[in-house]
Amino acid sequence: MDKAHRWLFKGVFFINFAVTLGLGVSDAFFSVFAQSLGARGAILGAAIGFYAASKIVFSPFMGKLSDRFGRKRLIVISLMVFLLVSLLCLSITRVQTLIILRLMQGLGCAMFRPVVLSLVGETTLPHSRGKMVATFDMSFYGALSLGPLIGGIIMDQWGFDGIFVLLAGLCLAALLVAVLLIPTDDNTARTTTMPVSANRQARSRRSLQHSALPGLLVFIFGRACGIVIFVSFMPILLMSKLGLTGVEVGMVMASTSVVMTLCLRPMGKLTDRCSRSVLVMVGGTVVSLLYVLIPLATTFHQVLVLGMAIGLFSGLSQPASTALLVEEGQRFGTGFAVGMFNASLNLGFVVGPVLGALLLSSEGLSSVFYVAGLCGGLAVVLFSITTRATASYGQAWHVRS
């Protein structure tokens, strides 16, 4: 990576960190803010659901738009949307307005997430792609870990106004960096990737059934279901079954994200030296087994070890799956592939809590984690089948050519 690309990578790293931190702070207290405006029941559900639905629906379209119209333009527009929403949140008094703003914020996320990852993938060389995407992921998971902590401090000192001022400041800083450091899209395209003809993209999309992309989409859906079930229901289990204190619950929950963040870069280096498909399958399988073991734990130290192990093996599969995704993007258009990936991720974040709530009321708390493990295991199996089929198709195509 030359000097220009190193500066570009640092700029996109900061942009992603700033936006993720701001959204992490505001999302942690969104439901409380909505209730302060009078949101209850279905209205509160709509405010939360519209945000998730907009990310699911718009992510693939925004990814395709970025392939056609360029990365910088969509990044700047998305950051302007985030900035506008954060400023308007300082003065709204009606919950109906909040629902509209939340929908706009979801649209901004659908525009932002696929494009920044596409830009990173296109500015890294294949032999170091695993290390670079893993390093970039640290900007997401590190900010996500800090968000609730910083948000709690600001909430205690300055209330909701402080939270939205922080979000606006971070979005403004990210916008300035994007304008100054991200080059024009024509220059980026010439220096980072080979152009993909329209005919080649059409042929590639017709061969989607022979791609690893469907398997990756299934894998990330199952992984997202497991993550959100763990985050949503683990505190209930720790407090109701094990009787842990708030500090102990916080330590267990933080251990997963901290260990994963620390492991991303070394696991990314491993990704560049080993089979990425194997790393995805190993990491996904072990995490699924660890979910199943959670209800069997009886002490604080046991659940702490399980949480750390989940973080470790999640870190094993994360860089590998992202590197595979970027490789698939070379065939289909990076924005399109990442947009589909992002949509599957957010769909898992929606389905997981609903499934967990139904199981909790009908079968009990332990069944929630058993089914989370089952979903993750099935996702790994389907990914494995798809990967083998893709390899067989690739060998057959090589022989024919």
Image: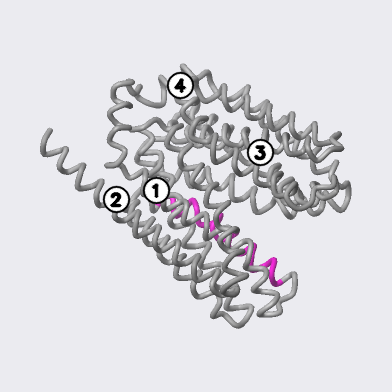
**Image coordinates for residue 122, horizontal then vertical, percent:** 43, 31
Task: Answer few, some or many: residues within 10 Å of disc 1's Cα (few below 14, many 20 plus, some between 14 and 19).
Answer: many
- x, y (%) of residue 119? 49, 31
Q: In which quarter of the image is residue 1?
A: top left
Q: Is residue 256 magenta?
A: yes
Q: What element carries label 1?
A: helix
Amino acid carrying mark 2 in the image: Thr
- Among the two numbered marks 1 and 3 on one chain, the one whose residue lies closer to the N terminus: 3
Q: Name the residue under label 2.
A: 387
What is the spatial separation of the Cα atoms under label 4 and label 3, in whole angstroms? Answer: 24 Å
Query: What range of the chain is rendered magenta?
Result: 248-269
Q: Distance between the residues labelled 4 and 1?
A: 23 Å
Kindly identify which residue carries mark 4: 68
Quarter-of-image position of residue 327: top left
Q: Which of marks 2 and 4 is nearer the N terminus?
A: 4
* Rendered position, 39 above or below 189: below
Residue at image point 27% right, 28% down: 203
Q: Distance between the residues labelled 1 and 3?
A: 25 Å
Residue 277 percent location from the top left of the image = 33, 53
**Dot 2: what SS?**
helix
> Which residue is the site of mark 1?
216
In this view, 341 is above or below 278: above
Residue 306 x/y as whole percent: 54, 71
Q: Distance between the residues labelled 2 and 1?
A: 9 Å
Residue type pointed to by label 1 = Leu
Q: Please name the residue that numbered disc 3 is placed on.
A: 19
Q: Identify the residue at image location x=72%, y=51%.
A: 28
Residue 30 position (above or below residue 372): above
Type of the residue with mark 4: Arg
Rounded to the nearest angstrom, the CA distance separating label 2 from label 3 is: 34 Å
